[in-house]
Image: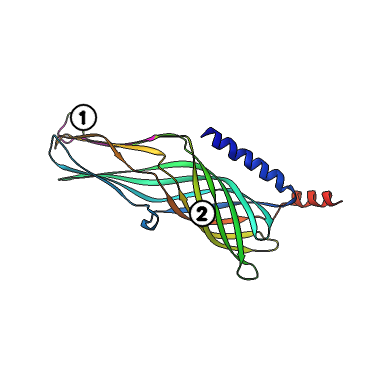
Amino acid sequence: MKRCAIVIFVLLFSLVAIAQDKKISFGFVAEPIIPTKLFRITKDVKTITDSASMNQIIFTSTPRYGYAFGAIMKIDYTPRLSFETGINYLVRNYKMEVEEPGYHISLSFNEDSYEIPLTVKYFLRLADRLYLSNAVGVSLIMIPGSVMTKVVNGAENSEDYYIFEQHSYIMRTMMPAFKGGFGLNYRTENSGQLYLETYYRLFSTYYDTRLLYYNAATRTDQINVKIKSIGDYFGFSLKYTFPPSDFIKRTKKQQKK
């Protein structure tokens, strides 16, 4: 995975160097993350019969809405072809539930990560200033660390005591992901460019999530229950890029002289 990161950073440096005589602009992005069954983003359910209580225990992991935001750098090679990179901060929210006769317990938590996207875009002109953008590329996902959350009720030696925990153990610190999407691009002469796009990221699970549940009243005791919490995600992106800076424009004029 370190090799992958080195290759991506070398590629970034090379692209910036090559693009010195091209248009370079900077901007920002805000993106809601939307769970939807259309893109395999669904609940994960595990049903287990406890050997002590003989109750049927149902564990459920549900992805909830999240968000991402960050900064972008765009390199225009031609009016129809550009390259985009930057760095984004992602927050994904989850709800874990456990059910057995007479009890329903839930907890919520979030898992965050950082993303360096490397995207190639091709534009089709729809009107004077309106373009259809088509994007494909990869993202380097960086995961800060493991996540643990728990819910506890009552004193440990009492009959009403129960505990419900989730441990999301980090599997790797970095991983690549496919990234693709499309949207609309509105261009102005002096006020920058506005983008409204959809994106889909396809990658494997990067947390190993385990659940623990103990209930003194029913004598239920479950540990190390594996359940899925992280996978693909779909989102809308609202982006804005400023016009090329005066420094870049002055540099171009000096080179022409």
Q: Count of labels shown? A: 2
Mark 2 falls on what kind of element?
A: strand
Residue at the image point whose x is 79% and y is 48% from the top? 251
Question: What number is the disc on residue 59?
Answer: none
Give the x, y percent position of residue 11: 63, 41
Q: Is residue 197 magenta?
A: no
Which is more toward the observer, 201 or 163?
201
122 left or right of 34 in image: right
Q: Amino acid at mark 2?
A: Gly
Q: Residue at x 65, y 60 (%)?
A: 80
Q: Which residue ends up furthest to the right in the rendered image? A: 257
| Residue at 61%, 65% in the rendered image | 124
Q: Quadrant of residue 111?
A: top left
Task: Sort mark 2 into few (<14), some (14-19) or many (20+) by Cα contacts within 10 Å.
Answer: some
Distance, label 2 to label 1, CA atoms, is 50 Å
Point out the stretch of residues depicted in magenta. 158-169
Q: Amino acid at mark 1?
A: Glu
Residue 189, compared with residue 65, is above or below; it is below
Residue 180: which disc?
2
What is the crowding at mark 1: few (fewer than 14 residues within 10 Å), some, or many (at least 20)?
A: few
* Principal secondary structure, stretch drawn in magenta: strand
Q: Position of residue 242 (x, y in %)?
A: 66, 55
Tell me: residue 85, above or below residue 80.
above
Instruction: Give percent across and percent down for residue 154.
Output: 21, 34
Could you say whether the residue bearing mark 1 is in a helix, strand or loop?
loop
Of marks 2 and 1, which one's residue comes earlier in the chain? 1
Between residue 88 and residue 179, name the one nearer to us. 179
Which residue carries the number 1 mark? 156
